[in-house]
Amino acid sequence: MKKLIASLLVAGALTGATVAALAQSSDGNMGHMDPAKMEQMVNRHLADFKAKLKLAPSQEAAWTTFANAMKPSGEMKAKRPDHADMEKLALPERIDKMRAFRKERMAAMDAAMDKRDEAIKTFYATLTPEQKKIADEEHSKMMHHHHHPDM
């Protein structure tokens, strides 16, 4: 159970951060946040988490590997079909093209999340029991906040 919680810790934190960022985004870009702002937010969350964990110098290498895996990357981006090309297609062909796009996008997202999950598990294994408790509590708080956005 603790491994599940740990694997969800950062993935959930990033998801929560992303949802909050998208909800607050006012750049008129259809709810997409500026990648620089997203990276800034992730870095802030990681710094807060690191401070709470009070890592020992011997844990720094594991932290660096973990933190790098948590940062946004282009892995989850699939190239959207060209609008002009889509207009040339009949409706059933458009549907097939969009279905293929969704499958590619979901596969990329699954692969990126699997990579992050493994990074979380690897890092979690380096934590002391007290640090694991902090990580578990932080994840629990984040999940509660994520399911209760009015809080």
Image (spheres, rainbow, N blue to C red):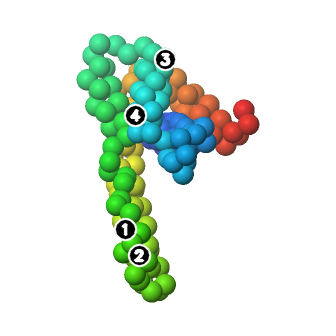
Seen in the picture, residue 144 relative to 92 is either above or below; the reply is above
Q: Nearer the viewer, residue 112 or 82?
A: 82
Q: Residue under circle 3?
A: 52
Closer to the camera, 123 or 83? 83
Relative vertical location of residue 50 with respect to residue 8 in this rendering, above or below: above
Q: In this rendering, does residue 129 appear at all?
A: no
Question: Is label 1 in contact with label 2 (beta carbons under 8 Å)?
Answer: yes
Q: Quadrant of residue 59?
A: top left
Query: Total marks drawn?
Result: 4
Residue 144 drawn above or below residue 97: above
Q: Secondary structure at mark 1?
A: loop
At x 48%, y 27%, the residue is 45
Tell me the distance, in whole angstroms, between the alpha carbons under discs 4 and 1.
Answer: 25 Å
Q: Are marks 4 and 3 in contact (CB under 8 Å)?
A: no
Q: Which of marks 1 and 4 precedes in the sequence?
A: 4
Q: Count neighbours of disc 1 (C-alpha within 10 A) and say few if under 14, some if 14 to 19, many if 20 or more.
A: few
Q: CA distance from mark 2 to mark 4?
A: 30 Å
Disc on the earlier residue, 3 or 2: 3
Kind of residue indicated by mark 4 = Ala
Q: Which element is circle 3 on?
A: helix
Q: Is residue 4 visible in the rendered structure shown here?
A: yes
Q: Which badge, 4 or 3, is on the more N-terminal residue? A: 4
Q: Nearer the viewer, mark 2 or mark 4?
A: 2
- Which residue corresponds to mark 1? 82
Mark 4, secondary structure of its residue: helix
Label 4, label 3: how far apart the Cα atoms are: 25 Å
What's the CA distance linking mark 3 and mark 2? 49 Å
Instruction: Residue type at mark 2: give it.
Output: Met
Quadrant in the rendering for residue 96: bottom left
